[in-house]
Amino acid sequence: MASIRIRMTNKRRKALVGTAFISPWIIGFFIFALRPMIYSLYLSFQKVKVTPLGIKTNYVGWDNYKYAFVSDTTFVEKVLHYLREMALNVPIIVTFSLIIALLINQKIKMRGIFRTIFFLPVIITSGPVINELLSQGVTNIPNIESYSMFEMVKQSLTPAVANPIMYLFKQIIMVLWFSGVQILIFLAGLQKVDHSLYEAARIDGASPWEAFWKLTLPMLMPLVLVNFIYTIVYISTFALNEIIVMIKDNMFNTTTGFGYATAIAWIYFVLIAIVLAIWSLLLRTRKS
Amino acid sequence: MKQQQVKQQSVAVLTRIRKLLLGMGENDGIVFKLVVYLLLIGIGFIYLYPLLFMLVNSFMSLDDLVNSMVKWIPTSLYTENYEKALQVLNFRKTLMQTILVAGVPSIIQMVMTSVIGYGFARFDFPLKKLWFALMIATFIIPPSVTMIPTYLMFKDYHLLGTLKTYIYPAFLGQGLKSALFIMIFYQFFKKLPVVLEEAAQIDGAGYLKMFYRIAVPTAGPAFIIVFLFSFVWYWNESYLAALYFGNKLTILPLELQKFTDSFTKMFPQSGGQGNQINEAIKMAGTMLTIAPLLVVYFVLQRWFVEGVDRSGITGE
């Protein structure tokens, strides 16, 4: 009996300590995060007019949401395009960044310089440089289709096979620029992998290939999930994303307005949540 | 007999070549190494290309810019672009402010997200799943939607025009992309063996002591990347900075946005052709804006490698 009571109080104490550790977040959530969220949800049911005197609202019920699906022809189209991109790009980006992280974690020459170079996308894509570069056209491969190699791919394969390949090549540059953060997260994770395990595996006759699948990948799996989440959120919310652009355009549009913009944003939010749930479910089943 | 011997010899030579090229056991072969270096250099070049392009162009005089013969190597090392850009950005003062604006919130954010991540990773408590889900929800909500409501909220709290608009949310785990950092720390602390904690508990260590004595030293790489990301993202966040600080504080990327205007104010057109703004001067300004970040990364990157060794020791 006594031992049970001790265990109970111990459990309760741990719960208390745990709550104490995350309490800054809970307080912050109520002070800083909840209010803007509720306010924007409220606005999505209103016709909003921004006047010099302040914001004027007019309750319209579900009209904004109906408008998105029924009257606004571009929205549904953009959503479908977005979902297709999510299914293709996210796994490509995560796989690519994993490979790069493995490569720059090896004992290669000039590792520091390589690591610095692979940090560049983090600095460049989040800052003023990307605008400068986009206006200069430095980040594109000019006219990829003019290369004969791609022409060959196009002609020798059926469209069903050739189109995804072409799409892939066009996306490669974008994939490269979107992978900076993920590469570093994987690299940080790889620092934690115990080297003695690899030696043991080698003595047991495991090839590097087997060691990767049986040792490295399972240890990195939690970070694969983090990177999946980050990639999904990043692609979904970066400033040049089609739907984000649409939200911004509608914010200051006089006919649709801020209310409609927030309504789209909330639909979009649910969509991202669903994509996230599907991917994390897929990853979890693969793990078990 | 002889034929067999030759055959045997050739087989031995072949396996040796194969060993050399494709690798055996602990040695990677030449072919593999070649592929790795080619891949890294190729991709590295794509990342480096825009920067090189800017660097080269920022050293070009007007004559070089106009001259179609000059593409990659300027005829002379022309530093006047940088001299002008330093003036236009009001570099020393702006740099100090930017370091303050990016540095203080990112240190606070790193510390607090590690504490919160530790709480999520090592303890069970009521509503844990709900809090975690809400945390992810704050991460996936498109920022363009909450931006204006957040601005109005800060106005209500009388925080606008001060660094508090960054510091307070960062302290309470609501800073820029805090959810990502909490998740990174969560995954790092989750892997910590329970044995270590139990041993510390027997030694009479409290939970806070257990956190910074045992958990923190094992997560060195996580601290470094979280600080780096946070620092870079606060550094580059010109939109929120303009919205929250008004004209009370400024950062380098903001000054860069105003570059053309400031330039024409500082160097009136009447001063002749040499006083006109051109791409080279703007690129010099852009280089000055990101150069400090590269320096910070290059310094911390060394720690990254050192952190490996240290965590290797504690792991054993």
Image (cartoon, coloured by chain):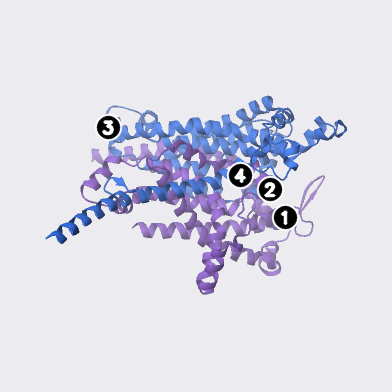
Assess whether mark 3 and mark 1 are in contact (beta carbons under 8 angstroms).
no
Which amino acid, by three-letter code, is at mark 3? Ala
Q: Residue at x 39, y 29 (%)?
A: B212
Residue assigned mark 1: A249
Question: Quadrant of the rendered structure where residue B176 is?
Answer: top right
**Between marks 4 and 3, how big is the CA–CA gap?**
52 Å
User: For the residues tagged 4 and 2, is the chain the same?
Assistant: no
**Between marks 1 and 2, how big is the CA–CA gap?**
24 Å
Question: Quadrant of the rendered structure where residue B165 is?
Answer: top right
Q: Is residue B297 above or below residue B35?
A: above
Chain containing mark 1: A
Image-based side of A98 in relation to A260, left or right = left
Assess whether mark 3 and mark 2 are in contact (beta carbons under 8 angstroms).
no
**Between marks 2 and 3, how big is the CA–CA gap?**
59 Å
**Between marks 1 and 4, how big is the CA–CA gap?**
29 Å
Which amino acid, by three-letter code, is at mark 2? Gln
**Crowding at mark 1 (Cα within 10 Å: few <14, some 14-19, many 20+):** some
Q: Secondary structure at mark 1?
A: helix
Q: Secondary structure at mark 2?
A: helix
Residue assigned mark 4: B50
The color chain A is rendered in: purple
Image-based side of B236 in relation to B137, left or right = right
**Between marks 1 and 3, how big is the CA–CA gap?**
58 Å
Residue A179 drawn at (x, y percent)? 51, 49
**Between marks 4 and 2, how big is the CA–CA gap?**
9 Å
Chain containing mark 3: B
